[in-house]
Amino acid sequence: MLVELVAENVAIMDKARLQFGPGFTAITGETGAGKSLLMGSISLCLGERTGPDIVRAGAAQAVVQAVFDPPASTKRLLEELGYGSDDVLYLQRKIAAGGRSQCRINGRLAPLNILKRIGDSLADLHGQHEHQSLLDANRHLDVLDDWIGADAAVLRERIAKLHHENLEVSRKIREFEADDREREHRRDLLRFQVAEIEEAGVQMGERARLEEDLTRLKGAEILAKALHEAAECAFAGEVAARDLLARSLRSLETAAQIDSRLRPACDQLQSALIALEECALGIKDGQQGIEFNPERLEEIAGRLDLLGRLARKYGDTEETILAYLNESKENLNFLAGSEASRDDLALKLAENEKRFGADCGLLTALRSERAGKFADLVGHELSELGMPKAALSATIQPKPRAADGADELEFLFSANKGERQRPLSKVASGGEISRVMLAVKTVMAGKGGVPTLIFDEIDAGLGGQTAAIVAKKLEQLSRNYQVIVITHVPQIASRASKQISIEKREVDARSVTRVRSLQQEERIEEIARMLAGETVSEAALENARHLLRR
């Protein structure tokens, strides 16, 4: 669903911000006020091409941004294309005065063709714009299948699965048929890689454990060296502090026997020697608690080096290395397979092709049976929409079997009796294509398709009872889709749950477009204007109130 549209410097529209909601929104205003600029702004966000003349005179660039609440199908497409799948989708387009265009999806730069793919999944625009799914014959098959419903969906799912399996089996058969020398070279390489990884005996989480042990052992090595040096200096070396203190004490005791004043110095030296002995015991205890194994340290370093080399060749982690090992074993087993394996694949392909062909045949029959009924229903709707002589038909032609079956389908159209039916893109005007789409969507109500429908020119040539019927059908359609209509017809505008007015004014001697959402009293005045023209009478106001009460 379209939630918000912001447009800046688009032709005569300097700045506009529109809030949309579910249901039926009508956009009204005098001719030339700029209503179709809103359609153009939306289509730009959906990937339609444009030129620099869209930029307001004197502005450096035109900027349009649309905010969508995307459906699940669009979220899956965004995820597939790498743009995330948030609950809010931002589409932005900038067109410089020099002609350069920049597209963003959720703030990230994107090419125009990707923006168009996203846009095609969000909205159908019907008017003088490219974003019209009915003009793309490649999408007609999906329209019919969506209308058919579960019967077509089940067959398409089976066909798509078989098509994928057949492609994979065919690929394996081609590998079998590849040059023997190339296959042997591949087999030798895989044998070497499998042997290298298996001989290494890689275990999950091994590198982390080894690095932890390495850190501990390196710490033990440093500690051992420090305590050894302390022991050498204190008591274990050739010139140790303990020996020097003992010699000093003996000499001082001899001196104290002669001079008693030296007795305190002897006592202090004796205390120092005792303290040093206690320190020596502490050093020895510390040395006994150290777990230092130089051989283990060297072993760990070598193992980590091996794991590093394997990681550079086969994957960053033990998990990816082991996954590569399993994949290589599977490939090796496949390459080492006998001719019987090739025959098995050929047999499987033949069986799949048989089932594939049968399901494609069932789907073709189903489409052929239902296409006429679908076209008749659309024709009935067109008659009610003021096109009693219009006719729609579906032509089904065979094509090479693919994931969607073995059919090409195109809708053909003629607006008047006796005219040759031709592709919609070649014969339908903007107003006609809008009514054809309204008829199609009415027939398909609740059966899939994009969530937002935007109509321009749907009221071309309408009046009286036909306009009232179109208005009613748009209102009914809005129960299943978000419907936005640009209209000049009061019967259509009055059926909308929300109305937006477009006005053209002069500001500082320049034409500008102003956009605003109308409250109830403002809607009465606007619909009265649509009924009566510039001079709004009390009768026109009463008629407007009557229309809005329906």
Image: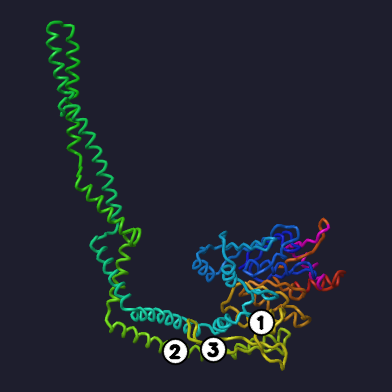
Which quadrant of the figure has residue 163? Answer: bottom left
- Residue type indicated by callout 3: Arg
The residue indicated by pointer 1 is: 425
Q: Residues within 10 Å of mark 1 (few under 14, many from 20)?
A: some
Q: Of circles 2 and 3, which is in front?
A: 2
**Which residues are drawn in magenta?**
509-530
Identity of the residue drawn at 39% across and 81% down: 170
Is residue 268 one of those drawn in magenta?
no
| Earlier residue among tags 3 and 1 | 3
Expressed as whole percent of the image width and height from the top left, the position of residue 140 reads: 58, 82
The answer to whether 296 is drawn above or below residue 194 in the figure is above
Expressed as whole percent of the image width and height from the top left, the position of residue 346 reads: 35, 85
Label 2 residue SS: helix
The answer to whether 382 is drawn above or below residue 494 in the figure is below
Q: Residues within 10 Å of mark 2 (few under 14, many from 20)?
A: some
* Extreme residue in the front direction: 181
- Relative horizontal placement of residue 277, taking residue 432 as reference (left or right): left
- Relative horizontal placement of residue 165, taking residue 512 as reference (left or right): left
The residue indicated by pointer 3 is: 367
The answer to whether 244 is drawn above or below residue 88 in the figure is above
Which part of the image, by quadrant, shows the N terminus? Answer: bottom right
- Relative horizontal placement of residue 82, taking residue 102 as reference (left or right): left
Is residue 517 one of those drawn in magenta?
yes
Identity of the residue drawn at 29% across and 49% down: 211
CA gap between label 3 and label 1 equals 22 Å
Label 3 residue SS: helix
Q: Are marks 2 and 3 in contact (CB under 8 Å)?
A: no
Which quadrant of the figure has residue 258? Answer: top left
Q: Are marks 1 and 2 in contact (CB under 8 Å)?
A: no
| Earlier residue among tags 2 and 3 | 2
Q: Which mark is residue 357?
A: 2
Residue 286 vs residue 335, the one in the foreground: 335
